[in-house]
Image: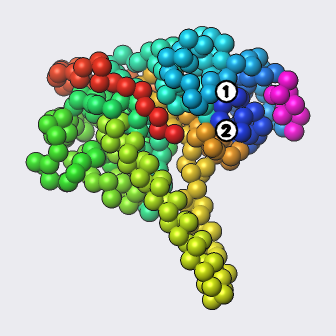
Amino acid sequence: MSLPRIAVDAMGGDEGVRVMVEGAALARRRHDRFKFLLVGDETRIKAALDNHPNLRGASEILHSTDVISGEDKPSQALRRAKTTSMGMAVNAVKAGDAGAAVSGGNTGALMAISKLALRTMPGIDRPALAALLPTLGDNDVVMLDLGANTECDARNLIQFAIMGSAYSRVVTGRDSPRVRLLNIGTEDMKGTDELRDAATILRKAAADLSMSFDGFTEADKVCRGDVDVVVTDGFSGNIALKAIEGTARFVGDLLRRSFSSSLRSKFGFLVSRPATELLKHHLDPNNHNGAVFLGLNGIVVKSHGSANAVGVANAVHVTARLLEENVTERITADLARVGEESLKMKRAPASAATTGDAA
């Protein structure tokens, strides 16, 4: 049985066509059953494919020279969805010409276009942006929402937990991922009414959802390795993500400054180089690239705009895994197990859902 092809917005990302095509070529070595739809300037794409014959034979080009910039507002992007490389890649998923789309372009624009074109799945009120973060354990941690919805009610958080758990089962291989809600403390009485209500329902439903739920976690525990899925609203999630990324850069910069401060420090660097290289690899965002818009009727993956070819390849790898493991069907099955009765609670106002930027 042939797998659906992956649409790649070849014009997205800081480096554009060269890096997006190289990343897709790297990913195809790992997923050689997939074919690709490369969307962008045909002349530039063909030139880039000359260096990657393995991808050239498995690709079709959809021509577009119109590109959504990082400064374009979501409303502007929506008006040009039919002509831009990003919009055409997502619309290929809507039309059934591709099973998933990957873009390194403007996050807010990608979310707006994807939500309008694909709509949310039955039983999901709002899509969420989920990403993998490195930990001290053997597993990466799935964190969502990272910026798509600034305010969420308990119903939204429960849906995020269901989607995040299904995604985690794909990427970690755990039958029962450890799920926690991000809070200011781990005690049951801590946090907002929304968090406490969501925790109460998730404790009752966890056994039916193939997840291990035990309440709350704090921001300093996110990357310890003792949790597989961290659930929060997009406002808190985006702040936490950027704080984690900023701390990683701070540690890296501090190490570089320390090792270059004196001759003795430089000698110490040579001695400890294997350890520092391992640290660098672990903290490199390219090795954890690929944020997913969960909850849509189709798969859309956001690659970091500054990702190199390895980073793009990882984003395509995430996309391929989601298609191979039928993550959308898993989410649908889990929602059915919970049942609508368990989720009958007041929804947050529609105006509270805003498209953010987690890039």
**What colouring style does the render use?**
rainbow
Q: Residue furthest left?
A: 189
Report whether 41 appears left or right of 291.
right
The disc label shown at residue 220, or none: none
What is the crowding at mark 2: few (fewer than 14 residues within 10 Å), some, or many (at least 20)? some
Residue 44 lies within the magenta run: yes
In the picture, residue 13 is in which quadrant? Answer: top right
| Element carrying mark 2 | loop
User: Could you tell me residue 308's position as x and y percent?
Assistant: 68, 46
Q: Is residue 24 visible?
A: no
Image-based side of 328 in relation to 37, left or right: left
Kindly identify which residue carries mark 2.
14
Q: Do the residues bearing badges 2 and 1 touch, measured as CB atoms within 8 Å?
A: no
Q: Secondary structure at mark 1?
A: strand
Q: Is residue 302 magenta?
A: no
Residue 9, labelled with which disc? Answer: 1
Give the quarter of the image for residue 290. top right
The stretch of residues the image draws in magenta is 43-51
Q: Amino acid at mark 1?
A: Asp
- Residue at image position (20%, 39%) is 195
Residue 9 falls in image quadrant: top right
Along the line of sight, the residue nearer the viewer: 246 or 324: 246
Asked if residue 283 is positioned above or below residue 114 in the image, the reply reads below
| Quadrant in the picture for the N terminus | top right
- Is 344 situated left or right of 46 in this image? left
Q: Residue 225 location in percent, x, y?
A: 39, 58
Residue 69 in view in this figure: yes
Q: Position of residue 124 (x, y in %)?
A: 34, 21
| Dominant secondary structure of the residues highlighted in magenta in the image | helix
Left or right, 275 with reference to 339: right
